[in-house]
Image: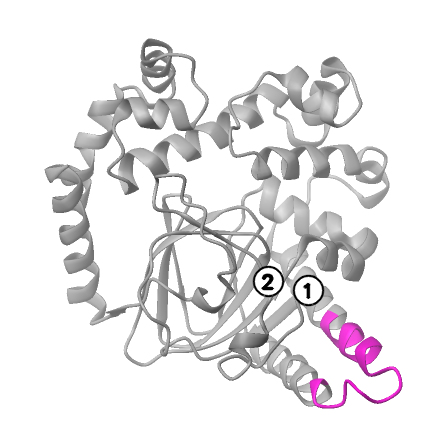
Amino acid sequence: MENFKTKSVLYFCKFALKEKCLTIRTVLYPFITATMDNGNGIKSINLDSMEVYQDKIKYSDGDFAILDNIRFLPDIKALKIGFHIIIVCMEGRLQVDVNGNTVTASANEVLFFPSNVILDNYMISPVFECKILCMTDNVVQKLLQKKVEIWNKALYITKTSGIKLSDGDRDKFNHYYYLIINEIDNLNVVFGKEIVESLLRAALLFICSLIQKTVPQKNSDNEYSGSKSIMDNFLKTISSEPIKHRPVSFYAEKLCITPKYLTMVCQKYSGKTASDWINEYVVQDINYYLKNTTKSIKEIADTLGFDNLSFFGKYVKQHFGSSPRGVRDSITNTAL
């Protein structure tokens, strides 16, 4: 408990002194529609029931939302988001923990996160400006259609969380952004919603074009298209499961395929087995709970679906090279 508190204080002071930042752990506070912390202090959020917050955001209809002001938001705990986010940093600096891993963005940089990740420890510089787009899984799939594979490969396979924008790219995104804002005022006209969706699709395709130029694409479209839906759905399924520590057969059954075929698809399109992917997501969850919560080791083992504390300890030792207590105790040293 003391190590956790010490780590939190040192971590904040180190960042704040360097960047003269203000904490704002609530970039997405208006989207909270349900509190589901299950004892771990993490709130699950989605884009439903946004009408009450219309005076604080640019737009929301339950499928996508737009905002650019985050300074009015009050303090809350960690958030598990039920939607995709694109954050374009126009000025200043943003830092946030994503599943326990710290990512940052400065001016002319874009952060993007898939649904079902945990965001925590938000910090922004005193001078900060951003543009934020939030979309559900269905909206991303509908708007990007076949091009969704670019988005999925970046977020789920290469684990890309951000890219750098040129001044021209930033201006072009701003152009799309303000076109969307302007057309939102005309939603009641004939084809108003279709126009907004078309502009939003254009903005998404623009981001995907930047991703494709920046992030290595291992397979051609034709090569990847054959079983892409299996790979995409597998990674989405792992991400959405509260307990990810499951056998390959559990996920294969959900996808209505055999475990052998699922592993073959994973190896072909990512170079990793299905078990490798499952372990990667489980390790992320373990890392988050050990380093960012005060739950006991036993509580964490229970939360993540391990049958007993001994097996959990062996699993952590195998993947972290240390015991659960050792991983937690290392927080203070890494914070200094």
Task: Name the one closer to the observer, 247 or 31.
Answer: 31
Would residue 260 be counted in the magenta stretch?
no
Determine whether, in the image, residue 80 is placed left or right of residue 239.
Answer: left
Q: In whole angstroms, how far apart are the C-alphas of marks 2 and 1?
A: 7 Å
Q: State the SS at label 1.
A: loop
Residue 108 spot, x, y in % from top left: 48, 73
Point 63% across, 57% down: residue? 211
Evaluate whether residue 237 shows in this view.
Answer: yes
Residue 183 spot, x, y in % from top left: 73, 87
Residue 46 spot, x, y in % from top left: 57, 57
User: Mark on residue 47?
Assistant: 2
Point 61% across, 62% down: residue? 48
Mark 2 / mark 1, whichever is N-terminal = 2
Q: Quadrant of residue 101?
A: top left
Task: Name the one closer to the observer, 11 or 273.
Answer: 11
Q: Is residue 251 above or below residue 86?
A: above
Residue 66 spot, x, y in % from top left: 58, 74
- Callout 2 amino acid: Leu
Q: Is residue 22 above or below residue 303?
A: below
Task: Name the one closer to the observer, 211 or 239.
Answer: 239
Q: State the SS at label 2.
A: loop
- Which quadrant holds the N terminus? top left
| Outermost residue toward the right in this view | 190
Evaluate whether residue 273 shows in this view.
Answer: no
Q: Are marks 2 and 1 in contact (CB under 8 Å)?
A: yes
> Colour scheme used in the picture?
one colour
Q: Quadrant of residue 47?
A: bottom right
- Callout 1 amino acid: Asp
Q: Quadrant of residue 180?
A: bottom right
Q: Is residue 16 above or below residue 311?
A: below
Span shown in magenta: 184-200
Report the residue marked by disc 1.
63
